[in-house]
Amino acid sequence: MNKDGQNVIICKNCGSNKVNFTGSLSLILLFLGIFLVCIGIWIPIFGWFVMIPVGVISMISSLPAMLYKKKNFRCTSCKHSFKISNIEYKEYKQAIK
């Protein structure tokens, strides 16, 4: 068995294949929205009229962000952040299984 790692996604800066998926914009917006709504329920006035609406808007805006066709990665060798397409991401997921 070859222990070289995956060869689908290569860092554009240093050429290393040691990369990590750092998440996508839609997940960040969704978790931020859920957090704001959950906290806003318990804070009178400011939470009800500011945090909850901002949380709902954040959750709604995560839906179109799910259609965004780029995924964020970061190289563990040189700390360079870069984006790849959904097609490359699916190949990456198949390679690391």
Image: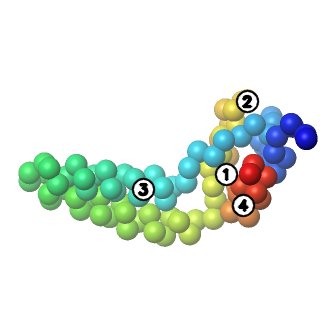
Please tell me which residue lies in front, 92 or 29: 92
Height in image: 85 above or below 35?
below
Whichever of labels 2 and 1 marks the residue nearer the N terminus, that label is 2
SS for dot 2: loop
**Quarter where residue 20 is shown:** top right
Measured in 3D between alpha carbons, the distance from the residue under mark 4 to the one under mark 2, in whole angstroms, is 22 Å
Residue bearing mark 3? 29
Q: Which residue appears farthest toward the top when viewing the image?
A: 77
**Quarter where residue 68 is shown:** bottom right
Whether pointer 3 and pointer 4 mark residues with C-beta atoms closer than 8 Å, the reply is: no
SS for dot 4: helix
**Which amino acid does the dot numbered 4 rest on?**
Lys
Residue bearing mark 2? 77
Give me the residue at 17% from left, 54% from top: 41
Whichever of labels 4 and 2 marks the residue nearer the N terminus, that label is 2
Give me the residue at 75% from left, 49% from top: 96
Closer to viewer: mark 3 or mark 4: 4
**In the image, which disc is placed on residue 90?**
4
Whichever of labels 1 and 4 marks the residue nearer the N terminus, that label is 1
**Which amino acid does the dot numbered 2 rest on?**
Ser
Measured in 3D between alpha carbons, the distance from the residue under mark 1 to the one under mark 4, in whole angstroms, is 13 Å
SS for dot 1: strand
Q: Which residue appears farthest toward the front when viewing the image?
A: 1
Height in image: 26 above or below 12?
below
Whichever of labels 3 and 4 marks the residue nearer the N terminus, that label is 3
Residue bearing mark 1? 83
Q: Position of residue 4 (x, y in %)?
A: 87, 37
Whichever of labels 3 and 1 marks the residue nearer the N terminus, that label is 3
